[in-house]
C-alpha cells in the first residue's frame, strides 16, 4: 500500500460526532461534487458534520460559498498567523464581510505561530488582536492556531478579553497549558497528533480535559491519526482519533463521540438546513 493512499474508511462510530476543523479545499474537495463525496465518506464513519477552515483570502471566499453547498458543512474564516505580514485594511474589510456569512460559524484560524517565520511576531500579534475583536463584534467563536506560542496566546487573550467561546484548534500544549485553558473556560480540540506514539505530554493533557471542553478534529489533509501517520487525511479519519482518545481517557467511544458532538453544536451553534441540530 502506498504512503500517499488514503487510509481505509473505518467502522462507523456508534454515535455521530463532528470534525471541528478541516481544510476540505486543501484535501482536493473543491467542487460541490467533491465536497459531497468527502462528506459522504465522513458520514459513513459517523462524522455527521464538518467545519472547513480558511487560512487565506482565496480560501475564505471559497469557504463562505462552499459552506452553503451541503447541510453537513459549516465554515470558519480568518487569516492564518503565518500570512499576516502585510495584512491590509482591504483584506480586513473583506474578511469581516465573509465571516458574517450565515454558515460561517467561527473566526479562525487565527493566533500565533512561532515555529515558522513567514510573519514577524509583532505582525502576528496585531492580527490576532484584530481577530479577537472581530469575533466579539460578530458574536462568533474564536478558533485559535497556537504553535509554540502558548504563553503569548494566553496572555493576549487575557489582556484583550476573550470572546465568549474560544477553541484551541489542534491543541498542542502539555498538562499545565491544558489546565490553564480549562480554567479559563476554553475548549480544546484534539487532532490525530494525540494518537501519535511519542505524544506523551499531549496525551497527559488530553486526559485532564472535562467532557464539556473537548472537541475532535482532523486538520486534514495534515496530521493523519495513528496508524496512518504520513498518509493523506480526510474528515472521516476523525473516527480514528475518537477511538484513540477514548482509549487514552478510559471512556467508552460513544461518550467521547457524543461529548465532541454536543460541544461542537453548542460552541459553533450548528444547525442543519432544516433547522434541526445535527
Ligand atoms: Zn488548520
Image (cartoon, helix red, strand yellow):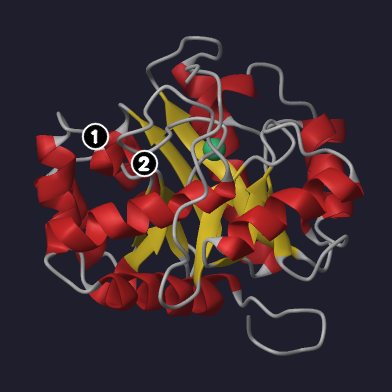
**Above or below: residue 77 compared with residue 39:** above
Q: Is residue 19 left or right of residue 69?
A: left
Horizontal side, residue 47 vs residue 172: left or right? right
Q: Nearer the viewer, residue 97 or 241?
A: 241
Q: CA distance from mark 2 to mark 1?
A: 7 Å
State the residue lying farthest toward the front: 1
The answer, for residue 88, to whether it is visible in the render is: yes
> Which numbered tag is attached to residue 192?
2
Whether pointer 2 and pointer 1 mark residues with C-beta atoms closer than 8 Å, the reply is yes
User: How many neighbours does mark 1 have within 10 angstroms: few (below 14), some (14-19), or many (20 or more)?
Assistant: many
At which x and y percent is residue 62?
85, 42
Residue 196 numbered mark, or none: 1
Q: Is residue 242 above or below residue 168?
A: below
Instruction: Give the tally of numbered discs.
Output: 2
Q: Which mark is residue 55?
A: none
Q: Which residue is located at x 17 percent, y 59 percent?
A: 247
Instruction: Indicate the position of residue 248 as horizontal and vertical percent values.
Output: 14, 56
Q: Is residue 94 visible?
A: no
**Closer-to-camera residue (223/2):** 2
Q: Is residue 69 left or right of residue 268?
A: right
The percent position of residue 59, horizontal first and vertical second, equals 78, 35
Please state the quadrant of the image where ligand 1 appears. top right
Identify the image quadrant of residue 84.
Answer: top right
Q: Say which element carries label 1.
A: loop
Q: Residue at x 32, y 69 (%)?
A: 213
Amino acid at each position: 500500500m502506498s504512503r500517499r493512499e488514503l487510509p481505509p474508511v473505518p467502522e462507523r462510530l456508534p454515535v455521530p460526532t463532528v470534525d471541528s476543523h478541516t481544510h476540505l479545499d486543501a484535501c482536493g474537495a473543491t467542487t460541490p461534487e467533491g465536497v459531497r463525496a468527502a462528506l459522504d465518506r465522513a458520514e459513513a464513519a459517523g462524522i455527521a458534520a464538518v467545519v472547513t477552515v480558511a487560512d487565506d483570502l482565496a480560501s475564505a471566499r471559497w469557504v463562505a460559498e462552499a459552506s452553503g453547498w451541503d447541510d453537513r458543512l459549516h465554515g470558519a474564516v480568518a487569516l492564518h498567523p503565518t500570512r499576516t505580514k502585510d495584512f491590509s485594511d482591504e483584506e480586513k474589510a473583506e474578511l469581516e464581510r465573509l465571516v458574517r456569512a450565515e454558515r460561517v460559524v467561527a473566526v479562525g484560524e487565527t493566533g500565533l505561530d512561532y515555529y515558522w517565520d513567514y510573519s514577524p511576531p509583532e505582525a502576528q500579534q496585531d492580527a490576532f488582536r484584530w481577530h479577537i475583536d472581530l469575533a466579539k463584534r460578530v458574536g462568533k467563536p474564536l478558533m485559535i492556531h497556537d504553535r509554540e506560542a502558548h504563553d503569548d496566546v494566553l496572555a493576549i487573550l487575557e489582556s484583550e478579553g476573550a470572546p465568549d467561546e474560544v477553541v484551541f484548534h489542534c491543541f498542542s500544549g502539555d498538562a499545565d497549558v491544558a489546565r490553564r485553558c480549562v480554567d479559563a473556560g476554553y475548549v480544546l480540540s484534539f487532532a490525530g497528533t494525540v494518537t501519535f506514539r511519542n505524544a506523551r505530554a499531549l496525551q497527559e493533557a488530553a486526559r485532564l480535559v472535562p467532557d464539556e471542553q473537548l472537541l475532535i478534529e482532523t486538520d486534514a489533509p495534515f496530521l493523519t491519526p495513528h496508524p496512518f501517520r504520513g498518509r493523506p487525511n480526510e474528515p472521516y479519519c476523525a473516527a480514528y482519533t475518537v477511538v484513540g482518545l477514548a482509549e487514552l481517557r478510559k471512556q467508552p467511544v460513544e461518550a467521547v463521540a457524543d461529548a465532541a458532538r454536543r460541544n461542537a453544536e453548542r460552541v459553533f451553534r450548528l444547525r442543519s438546513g432544516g433547522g434541526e441540530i445535527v
